[in-house]
Amino acid sequence: MVTMDGSSLRFDPSGELSIYQVEEARKQILGSFAQAKEILIDLTRNDKIDTAGFQLLLSLIKSCKTFGKTWTIEGMGGSAENFMALFGYEWDAPHKGEV
């Protein structure tokens, strides 16, 4: 779910990113966040996301801005796209996921 490659932290949740997985994901992210210069988020293998998963993503992006780290959404599967559309949230909009 979370890996480091040099100064890049990759967050690649497969399966569900719901209330049941968020705490473990958060712990993994926090374990490497300080060393990372960029955060790469790949949601292509994500089968389900709920509001807790969405909050984790927004919190991660806000933390990147606070600590001067770059972030990129590398891909998004249908489940994540549908969830974002349901709430009118577009990662590809000019604001690029700003919170």
Image (cartoon, rainbow, N blue to C red):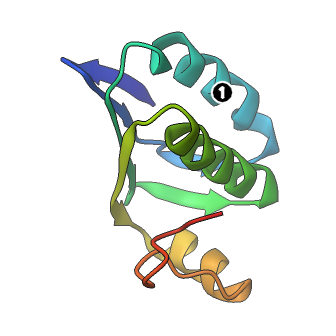
Horizontal and vertical percent position of residue 7: 24, 21
Say if 30 sits above or below 47 in the image: above
Say if 26 sits above or below 89 in the image: above
Horizontal and vertical percent position of residue 34: 47, 15
Reading the image, the residue beneath label 1 is 26
Say if 67 sits above or below 91 in the image: above
Is 10 positioned to the left or the right of 93 in the image?
left
Say if 14 sits above or below 7 in the image: below
Is 22 positioned to the left or the right of 65 in the image?
right
Horizontal and vertical percent position of residue 16: 62, 49
Is 70 positioned to the left or the right of 30 in the image?
left
Quadrant in which the C terminus appears: bottom right
Which amino acid is tagged 1? Arg
* Residue at the (62%, 87%) spot, across then down: 85
Give the camera-side residue of 76 and 55: 55
Is 39 positioned to the left or the right of 80 in the image?
left
Q: Quadrant of residue 92?
A: bottom left
* Residue at the (42%, 69%) spot, across then down: 77
